[in-house]
Amino acid sequence: MSLTKIQITEIAENLDAGLHCYVDLNEWTVESIPDPNRHSRDDERWTAEDEGPIETPQDNRRLLILRGVPKMENQQIMQRFIPTIDSRTVQDQLRAATKKKRAYKKFKDVLYKFPTVQQDWFDFNISALSDYIERRIQEVTKEPVVPTRFLHVTPVLPTEDLERDLEWYKNKLGFSALHIAQDYAVLKRAGIFIHLQWHANTLDDPLLGGSVVKFFVKNIDTLFQEMVDKGIVPPNKLTRNTPWNTHEFGLYDLNNNAIFFVEDVEF
C-alpha cells in the first residue's frame, strides 16, 4: 500500500501553504497542521535534516515528517521553471529574484505582476513538489541493501568412481559423508567441505577439464544483483529453492572454470 496521487498532490499543496505534513508509513494516512513558527518557505535555518522518519513511542507508528521544502530543493524548482516562460522580460525578473535574500518571497512578488505566469507557476510547482514527496517516501521506505557475506569456499572434484573415492576420503583423509546421491556426494571434516561429482570420462563427459568451486554465502541477492549490473550473468540466472535446498547461480571465468555462488535455504 502507498499514497494515492490525490494524497500526494494534497501534501504538495499543504507544503506550499506552509503546513507541516505527517505521513503514517504503516497506515498510509496523512495529517497536516499549521507551522506556528514558520510562515515562509524561504527560512534560512531550514535544512533537509529537519525532516525524516521517526518512531513514536505512544503507538509505535512510523512517521515521515515533512516540514516544508528544503531551501536547495526550492531553488532548483524555481530555476527549472524560469526557462518554461515565453517572455524574456519575465524570465530576467524571476532570475534576478532568485539571487536575492528571501528569494522565494521575491520570486512570488514578481509572479503577482503576471497572473497568467503565476498560474503556470502554481501548476509547475505542485507537480515538482509531488515528485519531491514521492522521492522522500521512496528514500525512507526502500528496503536496506544487505551486503553478501562469504562463508566458505568448497571445491567440486571430479570422480569416475564415486563409491571408491568416498572410501578413500573416509579412510585416508578422515572425511565423513554428509550427503550421497547417484552421482554427487558432500564430505566434511572439521568445518571443511569437499564435493565429489561423478563423470563418465568420455568425450561428452570428460573427467578432467575446467575446475569447479562453490562459494557459500549469506544474502545472495545482493551479490547476484551486483553480477547482473556488471553484465556477468543474465537476470534470470538465479535459481531459487533447488531440490537440495539452496539458492544459487553460476558463471565461468576466463579460463572456463565454473564458479557457483550458493546460499543454503533456511526454514
Image (cartoon, rainbow, N blue to C red):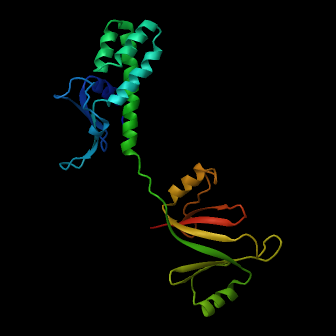
Q: Vertical placement of 83 versus 246: above or below?
A: above
Q: Quadrant of the C terminus?
A: bottom left
Residue reaching furthest to the bottom: 171
Horizontal side of 60 relative to 258 (left or right) equals left
Q: How far from the left and from the top, in percent, is residue 148?
A: 49, 60
Horizontal side of 153 relative to 72 (left or right) equals right
Q: How far from the left and from the top, in percent, is residue 74?
A: 35, 26
Residue at 59% x, 51% y is 228
Decide if residue 8 is in sight here: no
Quadrant in which residue 213 is drawn: bottom right
Decide if residue 106 is in sight here: yes
Residue reaching furthest to the right: 203
Q: How far from the left and from the top, in percent, is residue 250?
A: 63, 62
Q: How far from the left and from the top, in percent, is residue 239?
A: 59, 60
Residue at 38% x, 31% y is 132
Q: Nearer the viewer, residue 105 or 212?
A: 105
Residue at 20% x, 27% y is 38
Q: Quadrant of the N terminus?
A: top left
